[in-house]
């Protein structure tokens, strides 16, 4: 048999008042759904079965007041076992438990606890004691609850410490990011300033080149008349026209026409006069 009946009615047949006895039922799985349908069953006996684990929804059976899980093969309890806040009596004798979940500290109603014959952690075993009689089991419940509260407080402090470390690490990372972003902004600002300076120098250089270019035509126009005047051939100094004077110094008795003709022929034959005539004709 692996499950105590497939219907809630089968379990209801085993209900005696508020007690439900499922011991010695060869169970390897807890019928949680059927148990949840029986809220009157505040006392549940699951001892002497083959249970190795309890499902997480088992912790929803908050109506339980007394629970016997002795003589099974449980290696651990569910992490949220502390939800069974109404539990007053818990028998875990002869299982394979080493530790208890931290939520065990929430079982504030627990008055009786038996942890004998479990391979408990040495610290937990020392706290639990022998549990040989009713008194010791009550003491076990009280001491284990106090111990688990201390464990819970230690774990909470450790959690807070880790959170603080994470916050500090996050702050350092954010500060590092801010410093990096500020450095990048400063770099971009410096690069922008350098680019502006480079463009300003280029602009100044272009303006200077333009001014130089504008000066060149003025120089050329100023030098042009000089070059033009220098290109014109200088007139040679006038020579004494001895021959012309000789022609003109003829006897006065010669007729005017003869003198004129002779003078013209003499002037035409003269080199200097020819040059003057050519220059005048070109003008």
Image (tube, rainbow, N blue to C red):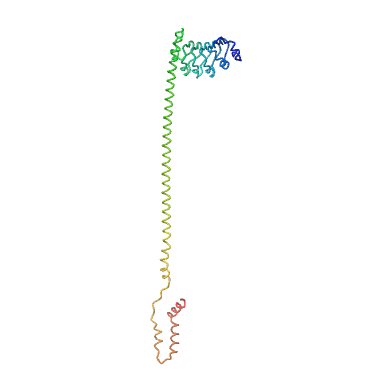
Which quarter of the rendering shows the N terminus?
top right
Instruction: Name the quadrant containing residue 52.
Output: top right
**Residue 190 pos. (x, y %):** 41, 44
Q: How many marks?
A: 0
Q: Which residue lies furthest to the bottom in this view?
A: 253
Which residue occupies the foreground of this view, 94 or 272?
94
**Residue 70 pos. (x, y %):** 52, 11
Residue 176's place in the image compared with 33, above or below, is below
Which residue occupies the foreground of this view, 257 or 120?
120
Relative horizontal placement of residue 230, taking residue 7 as reference (left or right): left
Which residue occupies the foreground of this view, 261 or 280?
280
Instruction: Name the quadrant containing residue 7.
Output: top right
Which residue occupies the foreground of this view, 167 or 42?
42
Residue 235's place in the image compared with 39, above or below, is below
**Residue 35 pos. (x, y %):** 56, 15
**Residue 272 pos. (x, y %):** 42, 79
Residue 245's place in the image compared with 221, above or below, is below
């Amino acid at each position: 048999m692996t499950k105590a009946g497939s219907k809630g009615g089968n379990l209801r047949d085993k209900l005696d008042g508020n007690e439900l006895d499922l011991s010695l039922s060869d169970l390897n799985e807890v019928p949680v759904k059927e148990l949840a349908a029986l809220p009157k069953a505040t006392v549940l006996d699951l001892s002497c079965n083959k249970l190795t684990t309890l499902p997480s929804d088992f912790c929803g059976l908050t109506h339980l007041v007394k629970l016997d899980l002795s003589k099974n093969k449980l290696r651990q309890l569910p992490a949220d076992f502390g939800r069974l806040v109404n539990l007053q009596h818990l028998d875990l004798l002869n299982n394979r438990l080493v530790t208890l979940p931290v939520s065990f500290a929430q079982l504030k109603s627990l008055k009786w606890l038996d942890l004998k014959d479990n391979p408990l952690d040495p610290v937990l075993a020392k706290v639990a004691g022998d549990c040989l009689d009713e008194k010791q089991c009550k003491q076990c419940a009280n001491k284990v609850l106090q111990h688990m509260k201390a464990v819970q407080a230690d774990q909470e402090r450790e959690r807070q410490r880790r959170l603080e470390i994470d916050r500090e690490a996050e702050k350092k990372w954010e500060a590092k990011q801010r410093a990096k972003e500020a450095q990048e902004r400063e770099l971009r600002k410096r690069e922008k300033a350098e680019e502006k300076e480079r463009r300003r120098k280029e602009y100044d250089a272009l303006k200077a080149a333009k001014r130089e270019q504008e000066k060149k035509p003025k120089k050329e126009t100023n030098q042009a008349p000089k070059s033009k005047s220098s290109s014109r051939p200088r007139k040679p100094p006038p020579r004494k026209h001895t021959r012309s004077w000789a022609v003109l110094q003829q006897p006065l008795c010669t007729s005017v026409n003869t003198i004129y003709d002779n003078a013209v022929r003499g002037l035409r034959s003269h080199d200097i006069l020819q040059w003057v005539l050519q220059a005048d004709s070109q003008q």
